[in-house]
Image: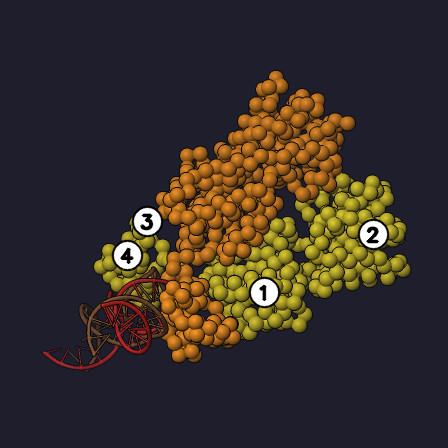
Chain colours: A yellow, B orange, C red, D brown
DNA sequence: TTCTAAAACTAAATCGGTTTAGTTATTTGT
DNA sequence: ACAAATAACTAAACCGATTTAGTTTTAGAA
């Protein structure tokens, strides 16, 4: 069992007040007229003993926790985990720690997690919001908590947002399929009211309309299991003629490609494929998969910078803004008819 | 700006003591002889106002934080993120929250993170240890903190461990290649002293020796960037004849397969491939990739159960143990000469 | 020499809970 | 009827920091 040493223990050992120790450790020695002699004495003793203040007590007193709460849909999704990773590294350098949790896009779970974050007194929030959590997010704003929303956002809520141009991304992808000679181009997406999904649908619709083709969509419920998605896509492909598919998310693409393979169809000869949101492994697929790549790095950098801004500023000056980043269409073999 | 209500505010509103409110909220009403009448009065008022105790204050007083610190190598690696995900969900049900961070297998970073966890007074630890962190982990044990170590462990440190049978996994994989007619079978691994890597090497060596073949290893430094890994593997393949490769980790396999593709070699005709640690996408690669699959679910369940045991027990009764789970060889096309 | 201002340091309040050690009112036992 | 036991409740200490409001010492000015 180890004895925990408190600031008072340190003070006692040096025969000074805890106040002096606190001032010195918080860099307020000069400001508080602590003599250099004493400052050095305290500093060297603290270094020697390896004393570190109890952060819980610190948080209680100051109201700051130096913890940022991050809420994503699923931390095991590569898109979210890589953003989480970069943001974590960046904020870590500034002394912040990240607390992240997955919502599964479940409204109730998301609300619960936001409450927990609140109770833990996190200093700021990074949120990829679950559906119908406008109220909770608005409340955070009213308490003037630093909040950054990313990947998707609620147009009615004046948050600072970082998103990609989903409409343009889907448009570019669909146009690319059109230009490569595909004619019955379908979209496989989620039946979701979330902004990013609606925009991807819009981009697809726009390109299809311009080409004079017919829209064809499969909307899948977001709770559907991977194997079931594969079955649904199989059925969808066989139902009507389809010579190309744009998948609106990473995991839809993975399950969908499995469906295509199981049907014995050949990509891109029988059916062209483009995924939204690139996957490290798409380059290694059979054949390699064309994808709309989201600028993960840029998203992360923006999220970090904006959050740090809100954390340092007095919170009132920063007016809400929406950063829209462009996507890159990474053309690989799956969308090029040989 | 929102007023934060404290337990004393609640007490005042009801004209009772904070003590009574605290007892009731902590389910100690009966034990502390609080009348049912008062208990109900407090309960209903708390429900009405939505009061929730400040967890920071709670932690300070009780020394418990209800937070578990989880240290993995890289949260964006699918193996770790899926374990993190399952463990998170399980512990969440018991009221615990997980705090996870990536060490990058960097000794210094890992030490620093352990210190931060300590300062934050986490109640327990789940660790995939970085090299040379024995001392720090031993210290946790001395303070009788609940610690579960997984994926790899230090034989000299009496922790509770959950690992897979790496030697057997690598052995099975190598034998499988032998049985399928490959003769110059190489291992691409990390030049790491970590147990799990040494065991994979042992399993490979055993199978090669039994077959009477010659060992051939490429050991890559763990900090090497993906593109560089690809280059190293290319060079390695061209250097000497190689008709099959066992990759010792997921990401080595991904970079290595890219190398094979860039050399224009055909899997499995020119070169057979097996990966250690399956990847959701291996089934979709060109061709599908045979892999040693780690029982992610079982690992997670064991980690959770053991940790909860340590957390509830008095900590002294639970003697250290090592759970060894078997791997599954998932045979796909990359290792079968047509 | 005496008074004032600045320098150097500290006691005590505070954050918001939990817990110990009581206090007061009501029963119970004899 | 009176002491002892129990029920019902609470004041105050405590966790470990920060910060406010002082206090004491020293230096400089008049």
Q: Is residue B2 left or right of residue A303?
A: left
Estimate the x, y position of residue A167 in percent, counting from the top left: 75, 61
The answer to whether tags 3 and 2 share a subunit is yes
Estimate the x, y position of residue B89 in percent, counting from the top left: 57, 53
Instruction: Check whether the beta carbons of the residues at disc 2 and disc 1 lie within 8 A of each other.
Output: no
Estimate the x, y position of residue A218 in percent, counting from the top left: 80, 56
* Pointer 3 or 2: first along the chain: 3
In this rendering, the answer to whether A25 lies above or below A154 is: above
Q: Residue at x 71, y 49 (%)?
A: A226
Given residues A10 and B280, the one toward you in this image is: B280
Task: Nearest to the eye among marks 4 and 3: give it.
Answer: 3
Pointer 1 chain: A
Pointer 2 chain: A
Estimate the x, y position of residue B313 in percent, counting from the top left: 42, 48
Give the residue pinned by disc 3: A2
SS for callout 1: helix
* Pointer 3 or 1: first along the chain: 3
Give the residue pinned by disc 1: A111
Give the residue pinned by disc 2: A236
* Pointer 4 or 1: first along the chain: 4
Separation of residues labelled 3 and 1 (CA atoms) = 39 Å
Q: Which mark is residue A10?
A: 4
């Amino acid at each position: 069992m180890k004895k925990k040493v408190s600031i008072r223990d340190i003070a006692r050992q040096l025969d000074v007040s805890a106040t002096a120790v606190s001032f010195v450790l918080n860099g307020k020695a000069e400001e508080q007229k602590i003599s250099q002699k004493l400052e050095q004495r305290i500093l060297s003793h603290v270094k020697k003993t390896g004393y570190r203040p109890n952060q819980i007590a610190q948080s209680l007193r100051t109201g700051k926790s130096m913890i940022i709460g991050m809420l994503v849909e699923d931390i095991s999704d590569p898109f979210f985990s890589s953003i989480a990773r970069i943001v974590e590294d960046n904020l870590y350098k500034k002394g912040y720690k990240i607390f992240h949790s997955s919502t599964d896009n479940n409204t109730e779970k998301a609300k619960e997690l936001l409450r927990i974050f609140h109770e833990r007194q996190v200093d700021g929030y990074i949120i990829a919001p679950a559906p119908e959590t406008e109220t909770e997010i608005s409340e955070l704003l009213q308490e003037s908590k630093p909040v950054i929303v990313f990947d998707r956002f609620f147009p009615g809520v004046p948050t600072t947002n970082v998103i990609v141009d989903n409409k343009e991304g889907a448009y570019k992808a669909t146009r690319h399929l059109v230009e490569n000679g595909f004619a019955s181009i379908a979209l496989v997406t989620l039946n979701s009211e979330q902004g990013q999904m609606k925009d991807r649908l819009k981009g697809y619709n726009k390109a299809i309309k311009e080409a004079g083709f017919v829209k064809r969509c499969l909307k899948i419920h977001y709770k559907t299991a991977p194997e079931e998605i594969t079955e649904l896509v199989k059925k969808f492909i066989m139902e009507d003629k389809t010579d190309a598919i744009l998948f609106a998310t990473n995991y839809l693409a993975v399950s969908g490609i499995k469906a295509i393979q199981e049907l014995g169809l050949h990509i891109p000869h029988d059916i062209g494929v483009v995924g939204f949101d690139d996957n490290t492994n798409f380059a290694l697929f059979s054949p390699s998969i064309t994808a709309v790549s989201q600028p993960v790095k840029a998203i992360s950098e923006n999220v970090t910078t904006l959050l740090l801004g809100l954390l340092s500023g007095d919170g009132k000056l920063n007016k809400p803004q929406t950063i829209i980043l462009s996507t890159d269409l990474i053309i690989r073999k799956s969308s090029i008819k040989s």
